[in-house]
Image (cartoon, rainbow, N blue to C red):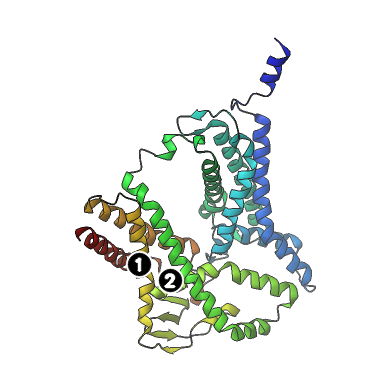
Amino acid sequence: MTVMELLRKGTSTTGGPDPRGHHRTFLAGAGAASASALAFVLPALLVWVAASQSTVEWTTALGVGASLWLLGGGAHLALGDTPVTVVPLLFLALAVAGGAWAARRAVREPAEDRTVTLAADVVHRPLGLALAAWIAGYAAAAALWSVVAYAAGPEPVLWTLILPVVVVPVAAAAIALGRCVRARPELVGPGLRRPGWLPEVVRRALRPGVEGAVGLLGAGIVACSVLVVLHWGRIAHLQGELAPGVVGGVVLSLAQLLVLPNLGLWAVSFMAGTGFSAVEGASATWTGSRTSLLPMVPVLGALPEPGAFPGIVPLVVLVPVAVGAFVGWRSLRSVARLSRTRTKLTVTGVSVTVAAALVGLVDVVAGSSLGSARLSSIGAPAGAMTLALLVELAIGAALVLLWDRWKLRR
């Protein structure tokens, strides 16, 4: 064997398995999970250090931080017989986005292989194995943090651990794979690019549906942000009354920021007409707002004053109708201009259903309990909101379909 042949063999990139590379990718996944957990663990330890009169051990603060991280990833907690299910959606989104960035970096080498070897006509084999190793590392580290939570903090509800331990890393890896494929489409085969088990009409409807759900949630977040700005004085006064100190104030402010998308869902439900509940006895619908004794959460100072609302308020329903029109427009762009009316109706109907269902699913993940009694059922009613949004989005989409049909008949 010549020297040149030895060199070619040593630099071959045929996509064969590399156990050492998989070990590194596994550790990268574990590191990504631990880095995400530190976002809650470190503040918990800082608060423990800052509380000079604290009588709890530092291990308890560690367990509380681990439990809160699992809550941020979608798990539910149990404080004795009291359930805590409100998941800070902004942190959940950041955890998935950060995991996707970390996974993309971890699999850069197999994603850049010069020779692509597809496994089962689905994905480049070394890339698929690397992503699987990263998911396994993340899941293993998340499982260890779960043990810490069980040992020293509020206990997570076992079946809900599937979200932070499995769903989050799988979603992050899927996003990372999507980014790799955008750069190099040949990394995946037809089996993944156009899966046979997914009907064509659903494939065309998914993107408009997701965009519609994002548009609804974005509108809700904007509405909440406006209310926070308008009632900033009241919120700042409540924050001052709590006297949390410098460290506690920063932690409290960040915690309220992380639940901003949750409050955005409340606003979406209000726009849809189903309203929301801050605590038992304190709610808001189109007709008006009722008040009750609220927990000392400063951001709740942005809630409307109790009383009847002006008769113009129900016009906020035009927001989900407008989003429905956008979904209808995007659905029409996903099919041929001269497609049959039945095809357009089917794609648009599936898109509208996807948008409403996604918002409802996010509301279910967001949770509805911060404790017992009056705090046991807060937020938006997921089922009623989903049905209302389905009707309102359908109205907006139907208007666009009628306009399209009118243009074709001219």
Q: Which quadrant, please, contains the N terminus?
A: top right
The tag earlier along the polypeptide, 1 or 2, is 2
Q: Left or right: 121 with respect to 389?
A: right
Q: Residue at x 67, y 20 (%)?
A: 8
**Disc 2 residue type?**
Val
Q: Nearer the viewer, residue 290 or 223?
A: 223
Tell which residue pokes out farthest to the top in this image: 1
On the image, the x and y values in percent for residue 165 come to: 57, 49
Compared to 28, does 260 lie above or below? below
Q: Mark 1, residues whose alpha carbon is within 10 Å: few (<14), some, or many (≥20)?
A: many
**Label 1, on which residue?**
389
Q: Quadrant of residue 241?
A: bottom right
On the image, which quarter does residue 103 sit in?
top right
Q: Is residue 101 left or right of residue 162?
A: right
Residue 111 percent location from the top left of the image: 59, 37
Look at the image and tell me in which quarter the C terminus lies: bottom left
Real-space CA distance between mark 1 and mark 2, rounded to the nearest whole angstrom: 9 Å
Q: In the rendered image, which quarter is residue 359 located in?
A: bottom left
Disc number placed over residue 268 in the picture, else none? 2
Task: Check disc 1 and report its element: helix, strand or loop.
Answer: helix
Residue 401 visible in the snapshot: yes
Q: Residue at x 65, y 47 (%)?
A: 141
Near-viewer residue (160 or 324): 324
Looking at the image, residue 378 lies above or below residue 23 = below
Which residue is at a point 42% across and 35% down the rendered structure image?
191
Q: Residues within 10 Å of mark 2 (few under 14, many from 20)?
A: many
**Image mark count:** 2
Disc 2 is placed on an element classified as helix
Residue type at the position of mark 1: Leu
- Residue 97 percent across, percent down from the top left: 58, 54
Where is residue 293 drawn, in percent x and y?
Answer: 52, 84
